[in-house]
Amino acid sequence: MSDSDDDLPLSALTKEVSSKKRKREQADPEDGDDEDFEVDKKKHKKDKKNKKDKKNKKDKKHKKGKKHKKEKKNKHSRDRPKSKTKPANAKKSPSKKKGPTIKEMHALKKLEMAMKAHKWWEAEKLNEDMKWRTLEHNGVMFPPPYETHGVKLVYDGKDVDLTPEQEEIATLYAAVPLDGPQLGDPKTAKVFNKNFFADFKKALGRNHVIKKFEFCDFSKLRTHVMAEREAKKNLTKDQKEAKKAEDDAKRMVYSFAFVDGNIQKVGNVMVEPPGLFRGRGEHPKTGTLKKRVMPEQITINIGPDAPVPKCPVPGHNWGKIVHKHDVTWLATWKENVMDNTKYVWLAASSGFKGLSDMEKYEKARRLKKFIPKIRKDYEGNLVSRSIQKKQLATAMWVIDRLALRVGNEKDDDEADTVGCCSLRVEHITVDHENNTLTMDFLGKDSMRHHQTYELEKNYGEIGMKILKNFDAFCKKKKPDTDVFDQLDVGTLNDHLKTLMPGLSAKVFRTYNASSTLEEQLEDLDHDIPDQEKLLAYNSANRKVAILCNHQRTVSKAAEASLDKLSGLVELSKRQLEELKSMRKRRKKGKDVKLKAENLTTPEEKREQAHLFLRQPSVEQVEKRIDMWLKKIDTQELNLKNKDDNKTVALGTSKINYCDPRISVAWAKRNECPIEKIFPQALRDKFPWAMNESDAYKF
């Protein structure tokens, strides 16, 4: 009781106590009187039981009535015919089928699609001295700066500290494969190492501890390079896609230009990264350091009203900004190895390159009309009293009939590659007994040209005049002397221009390649498989490649691919014989070997691909035999195609020398899908040729 209760009257206090007691009993019965609680508890249980009994009786009655109604309903439903329609308010079960996955097109792809919408070949042509009216682009992209790794170069058994510049050069050398064409060939390796170490010493400085190449050990650096390569290979699919998306986002900034208001794709957006010059064949500068190109070395070509592209390298700026309407390059600089001028062009699919291609093939078509006149000119001069005219006529015959490149003079620091006008006595062998002429020299890209020509057999009287002239031009000369010592490329091209306006020696290769392809392509039966059509096309294209000496070395990967394909053919033939044996057994009602369950490796699955999971019928076996016969035909065609073309570069003639309209017209006439003979890159390069009719003639 609180202190304030003393002032209250007794009646009030009693009433308050009774009230508090009732509240306490309601809140917790155990706090009240035990006897009263027991009575109340019994009474509560009895009331609860009575209520439960009443409820059970009611539930039983309800269930009985419900059961009766259900039976009655079922009886009526049995008497009525079943309705096939569902009630209007019936809910449909949610469909489990998923809709097609919508793949969002990348921004780079969207821009490429927008570019293709512009038919530049139908646009208004500009004057010859103006290639564009407006030109806007974002400049060029630079390779990322070098990041040091801290792996040591070992010199004379001791680790050596290198500056970032020195470490980068040493790492570039460590990345060159020991069994590759540069270090795998002792003769080439000697030149490569000499040139590399000369540039490496310049970066090291005069007082550096590293003095001799022989004491340098790059093994630690090679291990580091190999580990980095393996790490890239072992990236997950998601990691590779994320990296590609990141690279694409960076490149997209520089990948397109606006030319006369139309979007065009840029070809080489990235400036060449630093590296060691490889070269082809026995190049005298192989191993020389290609230095990092800086923005100050680069000239940017844009329209006078276009904004100057922002230089992406902090603290640097472009060397020069020009507005040359008569050229099609976007940027240019000079590289340090050969002192050659490098350019950034629009892509092969752009209007600039496409227009150049169209003009090239049209010029070759015009040459076709002038060929009789040109041949009459040089055939008449083959017996001229003037040595210069005789050499000019002989060189023209070689360029026309044998499709040799014209050839230019080479400096001492350039690869010793040869063309017609730069042939030396050591490259020629005249055989009077068999009336043959053999040429053996390194052509473009240091590819060997070694062919023997049967001049009398294939060219008759003219061929014998050519043989006699070569014999005379080589007589009493040293091996390193020029065959055509009174002729140069300029004189040859000047003479050709008198016979046809704008003609130069290189047009003959385009003409000969296109003419040969058209002659070799025969119309086929439309019902033959597309693979056979491709084989026929490649056979014709191979004649062009041989004529133009488009060769390639057979790589280890190519040999392995041929061996694998040959093994698949043998496996399929063995499986076919097993299927024929199975057919005999099933005809006699005997069981055959079944396919094993739980095959895991691709090899196991391939070995048992012809077998069945359960005992087949004779008809099923015969159906599989037919399937295997078609499979073997396809495999053998693929094998023949790859084997025939393993040493021939078929792509070069299609890209650079053969008029694409010849191939498009042939494909349409013979109902051959164009994608069989022209990959996507070529279809993008020659959009102007894709709509050519099937009646086109070169």
Image (tube, rainbow, N blue to C red):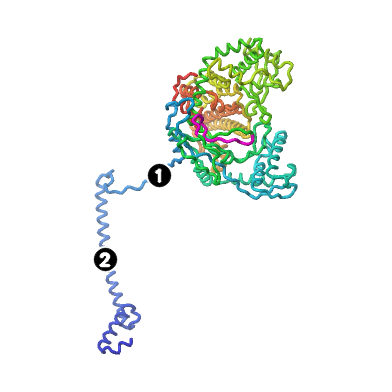
Left or right: where 15 falls relative to 428: left
Question: Looking at the picture, which amino acid does disc 1 mark?
Answer: Lys
User: Residue shown at 27%/51% (left/top)?
Assistant: 74
N-terminal of the pair, mark 1 or mark 2, is 2
For residue 261, which numbered disc appears in the image?
none
Residue 594, can we see it? no
The span shown in magenta is: 323-337
Q: Position of residue 32 (x, y in %)?
A: 33, 82
Q: Mark 1 and mark 2: span between their CA atoms?
A: 53 Å
Quadrant occupied by the N terminus? bottom left
For residue 98, which numbered disc appears in the image?
1
Magenta part mainly helix, strand or loop?
Answer: loop
Is 72 magenta? The answer is no
Left or right: where 510 falls relative to 288: left
Question: Looking at the picture, which amino acid does disc 2 mark?
Answer: Lys
Residue 424, can we see it? yes
Is 325 magenta? The answer is yes
Q: Position of residue 562 (x, y in %)?
A: 61, 31
For numbered disc 2, what is the local secondary structure?
Answer: helix
For residue 57, which numbered disc appears in the image?
2
* In-front residue for pair 672/690: 690
Marks 1 and 2: CB-CB under 8 Å?
no
Q: Quick one: label 2, few (<14), some, or many (20+) residues within 10 Å? A: few
Mark 1 or mark 2, whichever is nearer to me = 1
For numbered disc 1, what is the local secondary structure?
Answer: loop
Q: Quick one: label 1, few (<14), some, or many (20+) residues within 10 Å? A: few
Left or right: where 603 falls relative to 30: right
